[in-house]
Amino acid sequence: MLLQELKEEAFKLSPSDRLALVSAIIESLQNTSNSQTERSAAIRRMRGLLKTEQLAPTDKEVVAMLEERRVERYLQ
């Protein structure tokens, strides 16, 4: 349903039903912002868990690790 159609349908509702609709929309927006806040906090905590004192592997080291994994997986 397009926004314009939705608006037209909303005007057909009784005042009490429109108020209930507005309350439902506000509630859905509040739940969304809380969800995003919780998600952001979880992401920050996860990033903290991933921090390490070690340097990131070089491209050559990554290639070697992938090759080692393939050997383990397919040749054993």
Image (cartoon, rainbow, N blue to C red):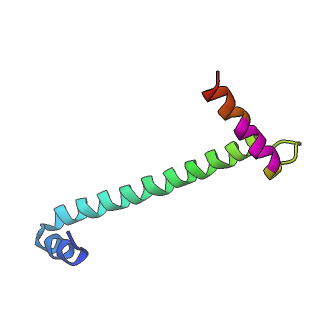
Q: Residue at x 71, y 47 (%)?
A: 47
Q: Residue at x 88, y 42 (%)?
A: 54
- Residue 71 drawn at (x, y percent): 68, 30
Q: Main secondary structure of the magenta part?
A: helix
Quarter in which the C terminus is drawn: top right
Residue 74, quarter of the rendered image: top right
Relative to 33, does residue 60 appear above or below in the rendering? above
What residue occupies the far front of the structure in this picture? 75
Q: Which residues are magenta?
A: 60-67
- Residue 70 drawn at (x, y percent): 65, 34
Q: Which residue is at the front of the view, 10 or 45?
A: 45
Q: Which residue is at the front of the view, 41 or 48?
A: 48
Q: Residue at x 56, y 48 (%)?
A: 38
What residue occupies the far top of the structure in this picture? 76
Quarter in which the N terminus is drawn: bottom left
Q: Which residue is at the front of the view, 1 or 59?
A: 59
